[in-house]
Image (spheres, rainbow, N blue to C red):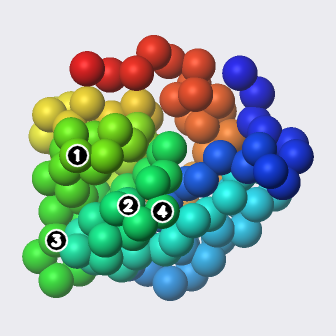
Amino acid sequence: MSAPTEPSDKLPVLVVEDEYLVALYLEDALDDLGYRCCGVAGTAEEALSMAESERPAIALVDIGLRGGGDGIALASGLRDHFGVAVIFLSGSSDPETRRRAEVAQPRGFLSKPCMDDELAAALRSTLAAPPSV
């Protein structure tokens, strides 16, 4: 399945990122790729609230959120309560972080900083994969 191209078909994507410039980049990249950023959350609480009101199809989630927030626990909540597919973003791609992240059954894992083509590939792969149970 390719990325939507018509405005009415733009798939909603939630960005959960507490670094302003990274969040801004992701928001712009999503728009350029034909997706609709339905919100940017800097905390797990904000993300859950936005997921409830906006019903995103996909969430790009930073693993390490400021203020003690854990992106891994958040991702599990987004998947379990709202059926949101999650792609993790992390500045740490070490084996231990990846092992911990697998608990949340992510659809992808991007190391920060990621390039547009990496983001596009992760989104396409997420849309092509069957829903996780």
For the residue pair 8 and 73, the one nearer the viewer reads as 8
Q: Secondary structure at mark 2?
A: helix
Whether tag 2 and tag 3 are in contact, CB under 8 A, the answer is no
Q: CA distance from mark 4 to mark 2?
A: 5 Å
- Give the number of the mark in front: 4 or 3: 4
> Is 60 placed left or right of 12 in the picture?
left
Whether tag 1 and tag 2 are in contact, CB under 8 A, the answer is yes
- Give the number of the mark in front: 1 or 3: 1
Kind of residue at badge 3: Gly
Crowdedness near tag 3: few (<14), some (14–19) or many (≥20) residues, C-alpha within 10 Å: some
Question: Is residue 26 in view from this perspective?
Answer: no
The residue wearing badge 1 is 81
Residue under the point 57% across and 65% down? 38
Q: CA distance from mark 1 to mark 3?
A: 18 Å
The residue wearing badge 4 is 54
**Mark 1 vs 2, N-terminal side:** 2
**Mark 4 vs 3, N-terminal side:** 4
For the residue pair 24 and 46, the one nearer the viewer reads as 46
Q: Secondary structure at mark 4?
A: helix
Kind of residue at badge 2: Ala
Whether tag 4 and tag 2 are in contact, CB under 8 A, the answer is yes
**Residue 41: horizontal and vertical position, in percent?**
40, 75
**Mark 2 vs 3, N-terminal side:** 2
The residue wearing badge 2 is 51
Q: Secondary structure at mark 3?
A: loop
